[in-house]
């Protein structure tokens, strides 16, 4: 997966927006103001910080230690840094991004979740 593909994926989710609160080089993808992905789309290797269920985070780091590590500058219990430029199948990276989005949405207040369900 490359930077433009990752950007397109992150922006494809319902109500997802790209923001730059940490400077122009860091894309922060949010849903209703809550971050689900953080990346420098021009970095090589391409990495992305993604929210993750704590049990899954540990399992993924153990299974893929060269490509998934504790979240850089993030709460290590809930965030992983995923190398997204070839070590893992693109399908898996897409699933991890989607899981991150879903976790953030699940943590939103019920009225906000209901608002996302509307067309």
Image: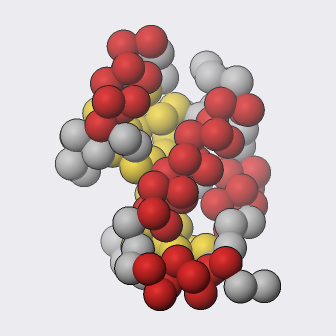
Q: Is residue 66 left or right of residue 44?
A: left
Relative vertical location of residue 104 with respect to residue 82 in this rendering, above or below: below
- Regarding residue 96, the answer to whether it shows in the image is yes
Q: How many marks?
A: 0
- Regarding residue 72, the answer to whether it shows in the image is no
Q: Quadrant of residue 68?
A: top left
Residue 36 in the image: state x and y as whole percent: 46, 60
Q: Is residue 59 left or right of residue 25?
A: left
Residue 91 in the image: state x and y as whole percent: 73, 32
Q: Quadrant of the C terminus?
A: bottom right
Residue 60 in the image: state x and y as whole percent: 43, 23
Residue 25 in the image: state x and y as whole percent: 47, 65
Relative vertical location of residue 70 with respect to residue 20 in this rendering, above or below: above
| Residue drawn 40% across the image and 43% down it | 52
Q: Nearer the viewer, residue 58 or 21?
A: 58
Relative vertical location of residue 63 with respect to residue 9 in this rendering, above or below: above
| Residue drawn 32% across the image and 30% down it | 55
Q: Tell me the colour scheme of the image.
A: secondary structure
Q: Quadrant of the N terminus?
A: top right
Q: Quadrant of residue 12?
A: bottom right
| Residue drawn 64% across the image and 60% down it | 10
| Residue drawn 29% across the image and 45% down it | 78
């Amino acid at each position: 997966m490359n930077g433009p593909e990752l950007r397109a994926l992150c922006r494809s989710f319902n109500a997802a927006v790209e923001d730059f609160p940490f400077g122009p080089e860091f894309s922060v993808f949010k849903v209703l103001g809550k971050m689900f992905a953080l990346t420098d789309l021009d970095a090589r290797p391409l990495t992305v910080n993604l929210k993750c269920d704590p049990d899954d985070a540990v399992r993924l780091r153990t299974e893929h230690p060269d490509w998934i590590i504790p979240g850089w500058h993030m709460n290590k219990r809930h965030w992983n840094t995923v190398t997204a430029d070839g070590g893992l199948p693109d399908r898996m990276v897409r699933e991890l991004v989607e899981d991150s989005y879903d976790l953030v949405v699940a943590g939103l207040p019920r009225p906000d979740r209901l608002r996302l369900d509307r067309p």
